[in-house]
Image (tube, rainbow, N blue to C red):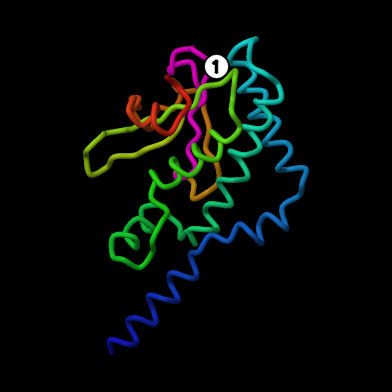
Amino acid sequence: MKYFFGFIIIIFINACSVKYDSEMQNQSEYENKRVIEKLQKTIQSLSLDVNESEAKKVASIAVLYSKFLAHEYKLVKPPLYHNTLIQLGLKERGLCFHFAEDLIKELKKQDLKTLDLRWVVHKKADYWEHSSIVVSAKNQPIQNGIILDAWRDSGKLYWNNFLKDTRYIWIEDTLRSKYYGNVK
């Protein structure tokens, strides 16, 4: 009986797996390009000083690397279910802060001059704590930035203006922003 229960769990986990590798192959380049261009324009609209090339790099990495991370983590939908599997020791990575940490590190490699990368948290030190990142124009308030949340939709990047993301009440984690991001 215990083997039967384990077998059912394995089938259930695999049935809910997020497989962006095959999805990305089937998804048209046009669709990725369209989403990246829309995010790029939104990033560029943060300030006249935002470099077009930097905005394009950030948009491309944010959209495509989020899907890559979901594949690397062998993510299972929905995100809270995946979190449970991590807590049970059945999965290793894929919590919101893993996505935030890995994505911000990848973006930081771009040595951005006109954009700031910041770490934000909802309900810090609470059971429902949630981490994400914000991209903003250099030296501009975080409230004028854009949330980049790769965890919320299981590797499909959610992005929105900071103040329009009403699902969470974000505050900046200044220590993580300084450590992981590119703010002083």
* Residue for point 52% across, 28% down: 160
* Residue for point 66% across, 32% down: 57
Dividing the picture into quarters, in which one does residue 55 lie?
top right
Q: Position of residue 23 (x, y in %)?
A: 66, 57
State the quadrant of the C terminus.
top left
- Left or right: where does residue 56 sit relative to residue 119? right
Q: In the rendered structure, does residue 173 fall within the stretch colored magenta?
A: no
- Which residue is farthest bottom? 1
- Left or right: where does residue 126 sit relative to residue 107? left
* Residue for point 43% across, 17% down: 143
Instruction: Return the residue at label 1.
Output: 137
State the quadrant of the N terminus.
bottom left
SS of the residue under disc 1? strand
- Which residue is farthest top? 48
Q: Residues within 10 Å of mark 1 (few under 14, many from 20)?
A: many
Residue 133 versus residue 144 in the image, above or below: below
Q: In the rendered structure, does residue 140 fall within the stretch colored magenta?
A: yes
- Quick one: 66 or 116, which is closer to the camera? 116
* Residue for point 63% across, 45% down: 64
Dividing the picture into quarters, in which one does residue 115 lie?
top right
- Which residue is farthest left? 126
Magenta part of the chain: 134-151
- Quick one: 128 or 183, which is closer to the camera? 183
- Left or right: where does residue 88 sit relative to residue 106? left
Name the residue type under label 1: Ala
